Amino acid sequence: MRISIGLGASLFVAGVLLALFQLWFVPWSPEIFLKMEITIGAFFLVVLVVYFVVKEYGENKTTRSGDRLDD
């Protein structure tokens, strides 16, 4: 799970840095920049969804095994 959090944070920071770089230096055409931002955003969403699925699966498995049942 730490990998997902680190990877998600890295993708978010990369998207922000890419936007700032484009704002100040304009190295790419608007079409290429938009494609790069959409790609980073899609990877970010994939990491986020996988993180939540794995987290929910682990919590569901723990609950079904009876380890987290309160008296």
Image (tube, rainbow, N blue to C red):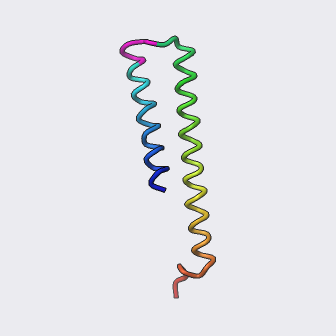
Q: Vertically, is 26 above or below 6?
A: above
Task: Pinpoint residue 9: horizontal percent, then vertical percent.
Answer: 43, 42
Q: Vertically, is 29 above or below 45?
A: above
Q: Quadrant of residue 58?
A: bottom right
Task: Pinpoint residue 30: horizontal percent, then vertical percent.
Answer: 53, 13
Total marks in image = 0
Q: Residue at x 55, y 60 (%)?
A: 55
Q: Vertically, is 28 above or below 45?
A: above
The answer to if 15 sits in the magenta stretch is no
What is the span of residues highlighted in magenta in the rendered image?
A: 22-27
Q: Residue at x 58, y 22 (%)?
A: 35
Task: Pinpoint residue 59: horizontal percent, then vertical percent.
Answer: 56, 68
Task: Pinpoint residue 70: horizontal percent, then vertical percent.
Answer: 52, 84
Q: Residue at x 55, y 53 (%)?
A: 51
The answer to if 23 sits in the magenta stretch is yes
Question: Magenta segment, principal secondary structure?
Answer: helix
**Residue farthest to the left, as pictured:** 24
Left or right of 19 in this view: 63:
right
Q: Residue at x 59, y 82 (%)?
A: 66
Left or right of 39 in this view: 25:
left
**Residue farthest to the bottom, as pictured:** 71
**Residue farthest to the front, as pictured:** 3
Q: Vertically, is 8 above or below 59?
A: above
Q: Quadrant of residue 39?
A: top right
Q: Nearer the viewer, residue 57 or 2?
A: 2
